[in-house]
Image (tube, rainbow, N blue to C red):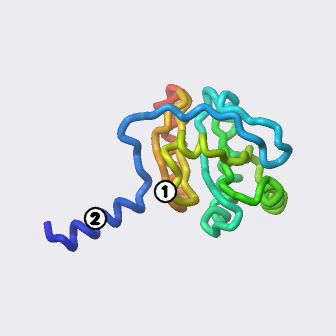
């Protein structure tokens, strides 16, 4: 394989959703809600398929994903699915809460701390999302914007697999 073909292949792989090599437990956390400062625990998502998305209010691709996440939350929550937004904004929860109100986010949003950033392996850019199975294991990671069709297929597979339908 030529160097150019190898470089193109590597570049393409960097932009595809990444399946983790071995399922890793989602880190435990207790983080303040961006809405009311109440603490939200990782325990609240036990036995759910969870899409954890790290985002910032100033990030255009992050904002672009919000309507898709709202739709997924609305459509799939009764099947044991949830989205969890984790804001990396340094300006505090007021700016995040403003975005929540403007976009009518219907899923929980919390403020990140160093522990949760490190627990997910370090976040080098936003958006970055992780898909967590009902057992609490991170099974896929998505660096950058993720196409709705890709997310939907991955989520549906997990929901079906873990409900015994697959």
* Front residue (pair 66, 155): 66
Q: Residues within 10 Å of mark 1 (few under 14, many from 20)?
A: many
State the residue position of label 1.
Answer: 143
Q: Where residue 76 sits in the image (x, y, percent)?
A: 66, 42
Residue 63 as seen in the image, left or right of residue 157: right
Q: Identify the residue shown where x is 57% and y is 58%.
A: 127
Q: Are marks 2 and 1 in contact (CB under 8 Å)?
A: no
Q: Tell me, for residue 9, which label it has, or none.
A: 2
As drawn, 159 above or below 46: below
Q: Identify the residue shown where x is 72% and y is 45%.
A: 110
As drawn, 2 above or below 33: below
Dot 1: element: strand
* Front residue (pair 83, 144): 144
Seen from this angle, which residue lies furthest bottom? 4
Q: Identify the residue shown where x is 61% and y is 50%.
A: 53
In space, the residues marked 2 and 1 are separated at their CA atoms by: 17 Å
Say which label, 2 or 1, has the lower sequence index.
2
**Location of the N terminus (image quadrant):** bottom left
Dot 2: element: helix
């Amino acid at each position: 394989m030529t160097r150019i073909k190898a470089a193109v292949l590597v570049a393409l792989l960097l932009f595809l959703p990444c399946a983790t090599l071995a399922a890793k437990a989602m880190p435990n956390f207790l983080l303040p809600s961006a809405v009311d400062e109440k603490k939200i625990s990782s325990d609240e998502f036990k036995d759910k398929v969870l899409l954890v998305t790290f985002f910032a209010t100033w990030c255009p691709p992050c904002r672009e994903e919000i309507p898709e996440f709202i739709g997924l939350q609305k459509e799939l929550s009764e099947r044991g699915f949830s989205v969890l937004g984790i804001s990396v904004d340094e300006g505090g929860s007021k700016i995040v809460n403003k975005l929540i109100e403007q976009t009518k986010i219907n899923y929980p949003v919390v403020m990140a701390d160093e522990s949760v950033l490190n627990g997910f392996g370090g976040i080098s850019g936003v958006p970055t999302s992780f898909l967590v199975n009902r057992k609490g294991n991170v099974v896929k990671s998505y660096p950058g914007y993720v196409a709705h069709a890709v997310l939907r297929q991955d989520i549906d597979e997990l929901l079906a697999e873990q409900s015994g339908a697959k």
